[in-house]
Image (cartoon, helix red, strand yellow):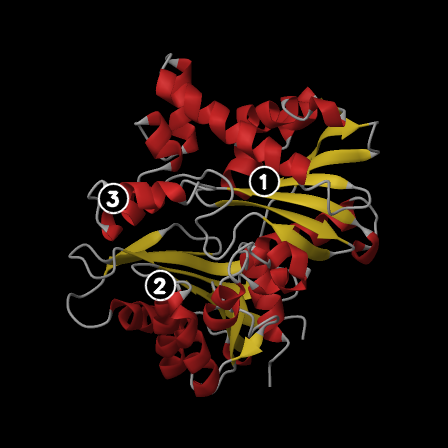
């Protein structure tokens, strides 16, 4: 159905992003964000196609996820979309080894998602709250989970296996899972179209850079390695996350009297751009401070771009050839200085920046920003659209 609409919900522990989207075109006719759930200033804002942004406060007490979904239901009903709404699509962060594709939700599936909460304690319980609220509000529609980790289930065993006691994997499921799967999936397919390649015969290194960041090696359209691991903490330096770290540091800090909570608060919420700069977790703030001569911001910029380039270089290993390095995410799409510095660090791979193309590629435009005659490859910016992936996959379950 060309006019099929899917309501996409992305529930966080204290927030809820949503979009009412055409599952064929990716056009969002309604989008918004609920935030500060559980606090006095809990609120929800939204924008309808062709209208100005609006905002409402949520009543205190009770479940703010349910209150937000109830308001979203009212908004959807006021748009008179009728039978065009065919499904509700939910982003779920962790599907473990159980879920390798979009899955229709029922109580058994919900129980499986809840059982995986130990692997994603900040995300899966919040995802379940949003799902239950939506099931109550839309009982007649198929509810579909699209998992961040699903795209990476094609990784070979040598890529996902940790060099640790095997029982830690067999008893506790400790292995590399990877995240940002919907983003890596979307941009690699878009890049293949733009390069006039069959995605099943295309090789990419996908670089998703935002407050969370990850790199993914994609061979013949499938994920074969990725930088995030058992949790989203590993891999690249991020806004507040440390990325790769010697695990001996954790033991060291515990022996120094730090509590477990202090250690993981520091690694998850006080590291990355924020920790290195001592200033901010926002890349835009880092760049502004650099211009003013802030040494901590300059160091954070250098550490981040160096580590991204190192991962890109290492991900040449699982590929037979490469068609493109893809930059996406809020930083990857919009930060010209960060892309430029990463490309400079890739000089051994032969990439020469197209300065005009790099300048033009920002703010949703995308395009080729560099070429490597050595590799016969390009560097390209592709704006991501994770909501479109969720909508299109959820629509496949429409009654």
Asked if residue 316 is positioned above or below residue 62 in the image, the reply reads above
Give the SS element for disc 3. helix
Tell me which residue sits at (54%, 23%) in the image: 337
Residue drawn at (26%, 52%) of the image: 260
Q: Is residue 129 left or right of residue 210?
A: left
User: In the image, 252: left or right of 303?
Assistant: left
Q: Name the residue under label 2.
A: 121
Q: In this image, 229 relative to 132: left or right?
A: right
What x and y, as percent, mark residue 19? Answer: 47, 62
Q: Which residue is drawn at 52% across and 71% down?
A: 170
The x and y percentages for residue 344 are 64, 21
Seen at 64% across and 54% down, the residue is 159
Q: What element carries label 2?
A: loop
Location of the C terminus by quadrant is: bottom right
Instruction: Say if mark 2 contacts mark 3, CB within 8 Å.
Output: no
Mark found first going from the N terminus, 2 or 3: 2
Element marked by disc 1: loop
Give the position of the N terminus as an image quadrant: bottom right
Q: Indicate the position of residue 36 as horizontal and vertical percent values.
A: 25, 55
Say which residue label 1 marks: 364
Residue pointed to by mark 3: 255
Residue 85 in sight: no
What number of labels is visible? 3
């Amino acid at each position: 159905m060309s006019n099929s609409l899917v309501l996409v919900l992305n529930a966080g522990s204290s927030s809820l992003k949503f979009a009412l989207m055409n599952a064929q075109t990716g056009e969002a006719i309604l989008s918004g964000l609920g935030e500060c759930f559980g606090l006095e200033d809990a609120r929800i804002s939204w924008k309808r196609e062709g209208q100005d942004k609006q905002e409402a406060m949520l009543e205190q007490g009770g479940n703010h996820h349910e209150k937000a979904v109830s308001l979203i239901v009212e908004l959807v009903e006021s748009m008179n979309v009728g039978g065009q709404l065919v499904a509700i699509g939910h982003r779920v962060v962790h599907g473990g080894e159980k879920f390798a594709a979009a899955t229709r939700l029922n109580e058994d599936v919900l129980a499986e998602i809840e059982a995986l909460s130990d692997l994603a304690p900040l995300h899966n319980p919040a995802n379940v709250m949003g799902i239950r609220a939506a099931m109550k509000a839309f009982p007649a529609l198929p509810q579909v989970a699209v998992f961040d980790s699903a795209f990476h289930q094609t990784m070979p065993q040598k890529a996902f296996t940790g060099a640790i006691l095997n029982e830690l994997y067999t008893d506790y499921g400790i292995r590399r899972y990877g995240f940002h799967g919907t983003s890596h999936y979307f941009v690699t397919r878009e890049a293949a179209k733009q390069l006039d390649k069959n995605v099943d015969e295309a090789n990419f290194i996908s670089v998703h850079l935002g407050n969370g960041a990850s790199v993914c090696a994609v061979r013949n359209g499938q994920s074969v390695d990725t930088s995030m691991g058992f949790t989203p903490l590993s891999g690249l330096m991020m806004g507040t996350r440390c990325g790769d770290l010697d695990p001996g540091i954790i033991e060291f800090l515990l022996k120094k009297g730090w509590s477990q909570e202090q250690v993981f608060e520091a690694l998850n919420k006080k590291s990355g751009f924020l920790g290195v700069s001592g200033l901010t977790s926002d890349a835009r703030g880092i760049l502004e401070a650099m211009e003013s001569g802030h040494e901590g911001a300059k160091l954070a910029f250098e550490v981040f771009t160096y580590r991204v380039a190192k991962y890109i270089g290492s991900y040449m290993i699982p590929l037979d050839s490469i068609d493109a390095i893809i930059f996406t995410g809020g930083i990857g799409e919009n930060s010209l200085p960060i892309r430029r510095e990463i490309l400079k660090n890739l000089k051994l791979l032969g990439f020469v920046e197209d300065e005009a193309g790099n300048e033009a590629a920002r703010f949703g435009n995308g395009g080729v920003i560099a070429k490597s005659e050595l590799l016969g490859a390009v560097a390209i910016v592709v704006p991501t659209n994770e909501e479109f992936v969720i909508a299109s996959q959820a629509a496949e379950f429409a009654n």
